[in-house]
Every structure is written in structure tokens, then in C-alpha cells.
Image: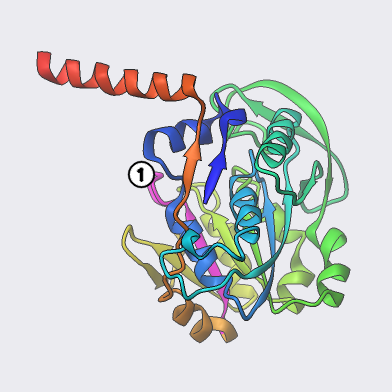
Amino acid sequence: MRLDITASQGTQIFKMITNDSQFEPEILDALLNLMQVQKRSIFIDVGSNIGIFPLILAKLMQQKDDENSFKQTSQQVPNISIHAHEPLPMLQEISRKLMHDNKVKYDLQETAISNVKGEKSLYVSAMSDSSNSLMEGFRPSKEVIQVQVNTLDNLYLNYLSTAQHDQVIIKIDVETHEPEVLEGAQKILEKIRPIIICEVLAKRTEERLELIFKSKDYAMFRFTGATWIKEDALFGDPNYEYRDWIFVPKELLEYFETQLQSNLKPVIKFKTGKNALHKYYQRIKESVKKRIRG
């Protein structure tokens, strides 16, 4: 699979992919292992940023006849309905440009997700385009804009209750506003029972998130760097390396643990643009020179 992400130059996710040739591989692997061929999946990305996960999944849907896209060529492509929410106009524009450049489409909405319907302030981070938040003071802000907000229950409960699907997976990464998102999804958690991939930042949201998930009879899984393990208590990674946890309805535990043993991994090659690659190789050369001089 080839993805052109040139339009995202300058963003934090672009920098991470340029440096590492990947972005949160443990999450992508988990998503693909869960979205098996025999299941019709609905994926909702809350706080999608440049839309890298929706983009990959949408491109994956085009690969139905290209077995070379997978390491396990006996696997076919799953059926996924993809929805994303990103309130910052600049990131929306990049997301749409990436869709256009890669000839894919998914449902991208500008509405931010919270626990109420109305309007809220979005604090545009002065540090990184990946740390914008509805929570004042999370990061120093360079700008404050007003955005429309709504709840997952309002937007998706009827749809998820009537759509033909086998499973729902919701990814939430909204820079400490995750508890509010889940407060606005109480009926979905109770009736639809989605699998949730949620960012957990150390010393910030653990207590509230743990209370929500335990009250809804969810199990909690943490990535150790090698595997996903079930935990009784929720705690963020103090090193901020593995920030996402997976929360699974207890009635789906056996299914979840079985699917994580799958090995459906696309071979993704990112096109980043000549200028970006030149800068990347220049950084490598400069690093090597410093080591030699040292």
C-alpha cells in the first residue's frame, strides 16, 4: 500500500512518520487484527487530526484485489465504514487534501465531540498541532476559536442501532477531553458495546476514565511495547510513549484476545515529497557528523 502524505508536511504526525516511517504501529496493528474479513465494522475516529488512521483504512478498502498489500496474502480485505471528527479548519483542509491525493473518501465532520450539544472554545496549541484541546490550560494556546460540539449519542446512537454491522470501534484522542466524550456516549456504551481505543495521559484523566469504564463493565488493556496485557487499574505511561489503551466489553474478551493473535499487517510506503526527504536525510547526515566529531 502506498500513501501520499506530502500535503501534511509541517504537521506533527508528518514529522513522526518521516522520522520513523510509521505512526503508532501498535494501534494500527490492533485495528487491523480486529477488523476481520467476516465482520462488517464501523470505525469512528474522534480527534482525527490529519486523518492518518481513516486514510489508511480507506486506502485499505481499495486493496480488495491486491493481495500483495498484506504479509498474509491469504487474507482478504475487511468491510469498514469510516467516520472522523476534526474541528480545527487547518487539519480538516489537510485531511481533505490527503483524501484527494490518495483517491479515497471517508466521512469527515468538523463537529467536535463532547458531553453537550452547542458551542465550545477550542484552544489551539502553541506547542504542536497534535495537542489542540477543548480543555483550557492543557497546553499554552496561540489562538482560541469557537467550534460546534455534539455528543456521540446524539450523532450516532440511532445510526449504530439500525446500521448493518458486526462491530463498532471508536478511537478517542482529544487531549484530556476524553472523559467528556465518553460522558456523551453513555447510551452507546450500554447498548452498542463498542471497543474503545482511548488516549490516557499520565496524571490527568486516569481516575475519571477508570470510573467510566468499570461502571460499564469494560476490561482495560495496556500496550507494554511488546504485547497487550489486561490491567485492573488504569495508569498513563509516564514516558508518554504508549498513550493509548484499549477498552473491551467483558462479553467480548475471548474474541478480542483471539483476534490480537492475528497477523494482518499492511506494508505501507509513505510518499512524503522530495523536500521533506531531503530535509530528513540532511538531519541524518548532521547527526552522523556530530557523532563522528564527538
From the viewer's perspective, tell me whether residue 69 is left or right of residue 141: left
Colouring method of the image: rainbow
Quadrant of the rendering where the C terminus is positioned: top left
Q: Quadrant of residue 110?
A: top right
Question: Does residue 294 appear in this view?
Answer: no
Residue at 72% over, 50% down: 84
Q: Position of residue 123 (x, y in %)?
A: 69, 29
Amino acid on which disc 1 is placed: Asn
Question: Does residue 143 appear in this view?
Answer: yes
**Is residue 60 found inside the magenta-colored segment of the image?**
no
Which span of residues is magenta-colored?
236-250
Q: Quadrant of residue 194?
A: bottom right
> From the viewer's perspective, is residue 277 above or below residue 16?
above
Residue at 38% over, 33% down: 19
Residue at 52% over, 51% down: 1
Question: For this rendering, which residue is in front, 66 or 260?
Answer: 66
From the viewer's perspective, tell me whether residue 247 is left or right of residue 164: left
In the picture as drawn, the residue positioned furthest to the top comes out as: 293
On the image, numbered disc 1 is attached to which residue?
239
Q: Residues within 10 Å of mark 1 (few under 14, many from 20)?
A: few
**Is residue 238 found inside the magenta-colored segment of the image?**
yes
Per the image, label 1 sits on a secondary structure element best described as loop
Q: Position of residue 133 (x, y in %)?
A: 66, 37
Question: For this rendering, which residue is in front, 186 or 292?
Answer: 292
Question: For this rendering, which residue is in front, 265 or 123?
Answer: 265
Residue at 63% over, 66% down: 212
Q: Position of residue 216 (x, y in %)?
A: 65, 75
Q: Quadrant of residue 217?
A: bottom right
> From the viewer's perspective, is residue 229 above or below residue 141?
below
From the viewer's perspective, tell me whether residue 242 is left or right of residue 167: left
From the viewer's perspective, tell me whether residue 49 is left or right of residue 28: right
Q: Position of residue 178 (x, y in %)?
A: 64, 52
